[in-house]
Image: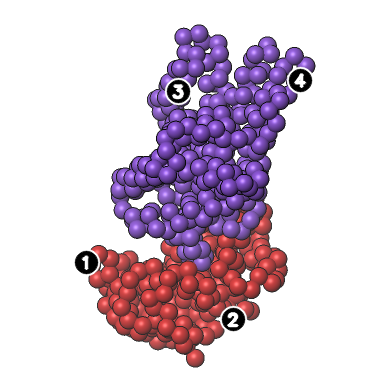
Chain colours: A purple, B red
Amino acid sequence: METFIQQVVSGLATGGIYGSVALALVMIYQATDVVNFAQGEMAMFSTYLAWTLLQAGLPYWAAFFLTVAISFAGGLLIERVIVRPVEQAPVLTIVIVCIGLLVILNSVAGWIYSYIQKPFPSPFPQTPIHAGAIVFGAHDIGVIAVTLVVLAFLYVFFRYTTLGLAMRAAAQNPISSRLVGIRVGWMLALGWALAAAIGAVAGMMVAPIVFLDPTMMSGILIYAFASATLGGFTSPGGAVLGGLLVGVTENLVGTYVPFIGTELKLTVALAMILVVLVVKPSGLFGRVVVRRV
Amino acid sequence: MALLEVEHLEAQYGWTKVLHGVSFAVEDGGITTILGANGAGKTTTLRAVCGMLRTAGTVRFDGRRIDGKATEDIVRLGIAHAPEGRGTFVQLTVEENLRLGAYGRRDLRDLARDYDRVYQLFPVLAQRRHQTAGTLSGGEQQMLAVARALMLRPRLLLLDEPSLGLAPLVVREIFRVVRTINREERVSVLLVEQNAAMALSLADHAYLVETGRVVMSGAAADLRRDDAVRRSYLGY
């Protein structure tokens, strides 16, 4: 029973990270109908930025918030400079642009920082937390807390602020949004900025577990795809819940199904994508999108 | 004085020219209607005024050129457009739709009073305020479109076929509100309609558009008495 609870909690921690990245994917998808394949590499690059700031001697949380702020600006810049010129282009063009961005960020990170893994610090205590006979990693609990704070912030932003409302409106109905005076282009850029900032948080939270290297997010991105597919690409809340489900399932299957272990965990995510696409393509909480052609 | 002056407006979709030099004006505080059959270019005219299409010709609002400006900038000058098909945000609640209506406004004082005002004009919206707009009936959505436009506190209201597909009783209700806000708040109105009888009874000035050209214009009362208009558009 102790093992079970421990595995669920640590699954929730990694699941929170998958969910965050999935949320970033869903935000950009809802606004522009494009899956941002570069989301993971953007997060990786942000994490290297945080590492540089930490090396320069900044205290952890100062580096953390500075990284989030710079990533926000970076996301804005990427949308304005790289994505905007192809906004009206066919979806495939934008996908190729995203993949190009992925390759560029990956190589630039490798060029600057080399491909050798680096340790990345956790802001949370090293000593495990004991609750009776059950032992939790302090980092796991910390990650769950950080994820909850990020989600609460986003919920309040989108639900209660006028800017958040305008962003939702711009994603749903760009033409009507212009007719009420919303600058739709800037709302899309803001979506990229927020996605980049969320990715930065996810990167910094996962780096102490997987170590820092230019490919550290590629596995996470696949889990994030699984999460978003499971929850539904049209549902932000679903994407987060999908992340938690994927994280917990992955851990439990790895623990209790002997032949899977840690080596075949990623296969579980891919299997989940496949099953969802076959059984319920819109995901658990997604809407079925009907398009007039 | 004319609040909106449009001269030689031309517009096209792809290679197909839809407006061939349309000229008209909306008096400050007046209600002007543009009548015409399907495909005459009425909706295109409104879209062109709002900068939703690339156009040639001049559009002046309050004496200033607005042609070539972005839609969102034109809206912020105080031109509210309740578009064809209503353009409601169907996944958002009635209240959120109204909040968005006020988005382009600089002066946010009296916002609470403006909510009360539109809820008073359309009491059914007050009952539905926490429902998503997609669950409203067609008539209620049209009311929401007008209410949302009013939240901008516009000087000019553009209405595109508010009667389309609605029961006569609902249409009368909407026209009553348009008349009220025109009289009490001096909001000028540009109304595009196929329902010529209703439009002519509301408007003080009317233009008749056929295949992208103005073929007749004058006081609404005169157009109503005109034999050709009566036969073609009023149907008696």
Under mark 1, the amino acid is Trp
The percent position of residue A7, horizontal first and vertical second, equals: 62, 19
Task: Tell me where residue B219 sits by quadrant.
Answer: bottom left
- The CA distance from mark 1 to mark 3 is 53 Å
Quadrant (top left/top right/bottom left/bottom right) for the C terminus of chain B: bottom left
Q: The residue tagged with tag 1: helix, strand or loop?
A: loop
Q: Nearer the viewer, mark 1 or mark 3?
A: 3
Task: Tell me where residue B205 sits by quadrant.
Answer: bottom left
Instruction: Indicate which disc residue B15 carries.
Output: 1
Mark 1 vs 2, N-terminal side: 1
Which residue lies most toward the top here? A258
- Chain for mark 3? A
- The CA distance from mark 4 to mark 2 is 70 Å
Q: Nearer the viewer, mark 1 or mark 2?
A: 1
Instruction: Indicate which disc residue A266 carries.
Output: 3
What residue does disc 4 label? A131
- Chain for mark 1? B
Q: Residue at x 59, y 44 (%)?
A: A54
Q: Are marks 4 and 1 in contact (CB under 8 Å)?
A: no
What residue does disc 2 label? B186
Which of B206 and A152 lies nearest the eye of the viewer?
A152
The percent position of residue A284, horizontal first and vertical second, equals: 51, 31
